[in-house]
Image: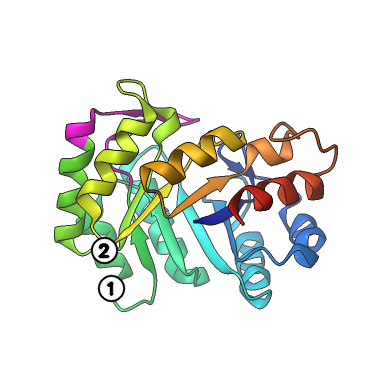
């Protein structure tokens, strides 16, 4: 299972993201992402370049709350050249925007709303949305399991896993301790994201960001 380190806090890219990417370079984190809000386009472009130059896979996660803003974020993903786009629910329109690029797309199943985002939807709905997304040509899904308002998080992960076959299941949002990493691993996740828990120094007793990230990586490896 892959750990995707998000340079984000409270669903926003952190203001000092460029400083942090330099700081964490010695850790050799293989998957690094950021959100579509919290920093301007040129900062995100530079950040993406630095992530890819480090040898890591880059991720942009959409948290824009209006349909047009979400599609604009997909256009941003193409413009700055990320490797993978996460989130959004306008799958057909987003795939049209990504057409011709090499960007893999993982939309949100369920009904995300608000900021920070909450997730509505039952396991049955998550399964149905995931099946539909795969039929449209997506590479997997980005599931906000621990933001759920209508179901137990692990039940949603299991429902998405059943629908995905060998496609990729990413679990994002509020993974804040080793127990949740173990739970999503056991339920079939291929990857998970952590941002706020590392920056808030709340994942482990470690008192530095580097220590937090090392603790997370130990849970994976």
Residue 117 is covered by the magenta coloring: yes
| Image-quadrant location for residue 165 | bottom left
Between 165 and 112, the one nearer to me in the picture: 165
- Magenta span of residues: 108-125
Residue 118 horizontal/vertical position (percent): 41, 28
SS at mark 2 in the image: helix
The residue identified by callout 2 is 95
Q: Is residue 63 visible?
A: no
Measuring 38% from the left and 30% from the top, which residue is drawn there? Answer: 153
Where 157 sits versus 104, above or below?
Answer: above
Residue 162 horizontal/vertical position (percent): 22, 47
The residue identified by callout 1 is 99
Measuring 37% from the left and 32% from the top, which residue is drawn there? Answer: 154
In the picture as drawn, the residue positioned furthest to the right comes out as 207
Judge from the rendering whether residue 57 lies leftward or rightward of residue 136; answer left or right.
right
- Mark 1 crowdedness (10 Å alpha carbons): few <14, some 14-19, many ≥20: few
């Amino acid at each position: 299972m892959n750990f995707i380190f998000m340079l984000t806090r409270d669903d926003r890219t952190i203001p000092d993201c460029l400083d942090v990417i330099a700081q964490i370079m010695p850790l050799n984190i293989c998957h690094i992402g950021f959100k579509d809000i919290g920093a301007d386009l040129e900062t995100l472009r530079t950040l993406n370049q630095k992530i890819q130059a480090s040898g890591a896979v880059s991720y942009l996660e959409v948290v824009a709350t209006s349909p047009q803003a979400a599609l604009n974020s997909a256009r941003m993903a193409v413009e700055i050249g990320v490797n993978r786009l996460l989130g959004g629910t306008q799958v057909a329109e987003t795939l049209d925007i990504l057409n011709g690029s090499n960007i893999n797309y993982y939309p949100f199943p369920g009904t995300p709303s608000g900021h920070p985002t909450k997730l509505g939807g039952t396991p049955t709905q998550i399964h149905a949305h995931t099946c539909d997304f795969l039929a449209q040509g997506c590479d997997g899904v980005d599931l906000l399991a621990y933001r759920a308002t209508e179901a137990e998080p692990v039940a949603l992960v299991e429902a998405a896993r059943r629908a995905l076959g060998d496609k990729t299941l990413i679990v994002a949002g509020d993974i804040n301790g080793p127990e949740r990493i173990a739970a999503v691993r056991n339920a079939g996740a291929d990857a998970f994201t952590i941002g706020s828990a590392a920056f808030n120094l709340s994942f482990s007793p470690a008192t530095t960001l580097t220590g937090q990230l090392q603790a997370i990586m130990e849970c994976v490896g």
